[in-house]
Image: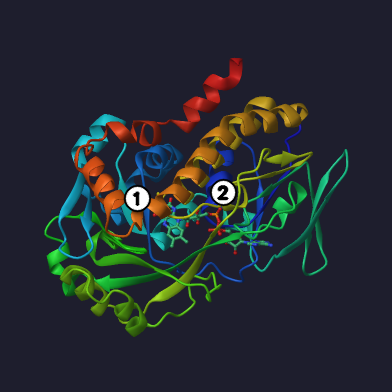
Amino acid sequence: MPQIRVAVAGAGIAGLAFAAALRRTGIDCHIYEQAGRLAEVGAGVQVAPNATRLLRRLGLRERLRAVAVAPQAIEMRRWDDGTLLQRTPLGGPCRRRFGAPYYTLHRADLHSSLLSLIPPDRVHLGARCVAITQDADAARLHLSDGTTVTADLVVGADGIHSIVREQLVADQPRYSGQTIYRGLVPAERVPYLLTEPRVQLWFGPDQHCVCYPVSSGRQVSFGATVAASDWREESWSARGDVAELAAAYAGWHADVARLIGAAETVSRWALHDRESVDRLSSGRVTVIGDAAHPMLPFQAQGANQAIEDAVVLAVCLAEAGPDGLGAALRRYERIRLPRTSQIQRRSRDNAKTFHLADGDAQRRRDTAAQTSSGLDRHQWLFGYDAEQAATTSRSS
Ligand SMILES: Cc1cc2nc3c(=O)[nH]c(=O)nc-3n(C[C@H](O)[C@H](O)[C@H](O)COP(=O)(O)OP(=O)(O)OC[C@H]3O[C@@H](n4cnc5c(N)ncnc54)[C@H](O)[C@@H]3O)c2cc1C
């Protein structure tokens, strides 16, 4: 039986996870990545059971265990006096309930783990996609060096500024008004944060700070938002100013001040998202990850959702065969859109609730947080098995 030819734009988490998931079904694909080399960039990423269960099935159980940290809890605190507002247990209770761990890890460790699943000759570097064309027989990915790749299906995994998405909708990223400073601090400089491995958040007026251990506990990754109307850069390597960040967090709890003070360098990133779309495919072209549903990182789910997309699309394509491409893409869209739209929306909502000024609304938020600290409220998010959703949708 002839195999479907698949070309993927972008070797980020979505593109690599998709290639790995597709290979597991026996279908080959080629990835075209604009970067000349896949460098170690970024800081930490939280990967919840809804994605770790999929990564383990892709064959990364041991590899992730070696580099990740399994935090024991997520703790939310007040910005000034550090009062504990909510503690959600993770660790053993989370693993037992959801059958997979909650991990915090360095982005580069997640990326290189996924890359290890793909033969090097399937990843084409320095290959920037500048346009997509398609007709009834094929889709074409046009690269900046003038070459054209012809495939049965083009998958856009090219991030929030996706070229491939232009096939579906003429929209633009929306600036949230928030920037985020990110940094990595050697663990020995902040031992008071590591008495127990935890995800810790401090909520305050207009901004919040989050931190957690990564790299097997050798480093602490942090992200601290600062509202700004004049910053538009989105790059893991755009330099921020530690002194400016420290000034923005003046008066915050000593743990936050000491954490920021321990950073030698920080990056600064303007946070964008887009409106949800009502379709994910057009003809022989589809999108996954941030190209499909870029979201604010206030639920820590963008990469998790990219991994879910990857697995679902792979299952749909494998089960449809070469003649069933249209039906496979419709099925992928039907499974993914409701979930990713909901998570995009909730991530935006969190931007408001995390940053409430002290007052009535903040007190209501804190009371609600203190009375709902279990894992129950994460069932819909962490308990979701995207692969099972895909296989059981077969008959619907
Ligand atoms: C501050 C911050 C914190 C976050 N924290 C979390 C978290 O804790 N948990 C979580 O799940 N998510 C988190 N996210 C979201 C997560 O980082 C993204 O959702 C995820 O990286 C999306 O992966 P992607 O592969 O779709 O896109 P990207 O990571 O953007 O990758 C796109 C790839 O495509 C390439 N590319 C782009 N254009 C082209 C082109 N024209 N031709 C060829 N290649 C191209 C790029 O070079 C890149 O390699 C966070 C995001 C931010 C900004």
- Packing grade of label 1 (10 A; few <14, some 14-19, many >=20) is many
Circle nearer the N terminus (2, 1): 1
Instruction: Looking at the picture, tell me which residue is in the foreground, 22 or 50.
Output: 50
Hey, what amino acid is under mark 2?
A: Gly
Residue 65 in view: no
From the viewer's perspective, is 356 left or right of 72?
Answer: right
Residue 196 placement: quadrant: bottom left
Residue beneath the point at 60% across and 53% down: 274
Q: Is residue 230 above or below residue 149?
A: below
- Ligand 1 neighbours mark 1 (CB distance < 8 Å): no
The spot of residue 338 in percent (x, y) is 55, 33
From the viewer's perspective, is 368 left or right of 317?
Answer: left
Q: Is residue 343 above or below residue 334?
A: below
Q: Is residue 325 above or below residue 133?
A: above
Q: Which part of the image, by quadrant, shows the N terminus?
A: top right
- Ligand 1 neighbours mark 2 (CB distance < 8 Å): yes
Residue beneath the point at 60% across and 57% down: 159
Instruction: Looking at the picture, tell me which residue is in the foreground, 233 or 236.
Output: 233
Visual colour scheme = rainbow
Hey, what amino acid is under mark 1?
A: Leu
The spot of residue 259 in percent (x, y) is 23, 72
From the viewer's perspective, is 331 left or right of 185?
Answer: right
The spot of residue 386 in percent (x, y) is 48, 32
Q: Which part of the image, by quadrant, shows the C terminus?
A: top right
Q: Which tag is nearer the camera, tag 2 or tag 1?
A: 2
Query: To which residue does mark 1 refer?
Result: 64
Disc marking residue 289: 2
**Helix or strand or loop: what does disc 1 sit on?**
helix
Residue 285 placement: quadrant: top right
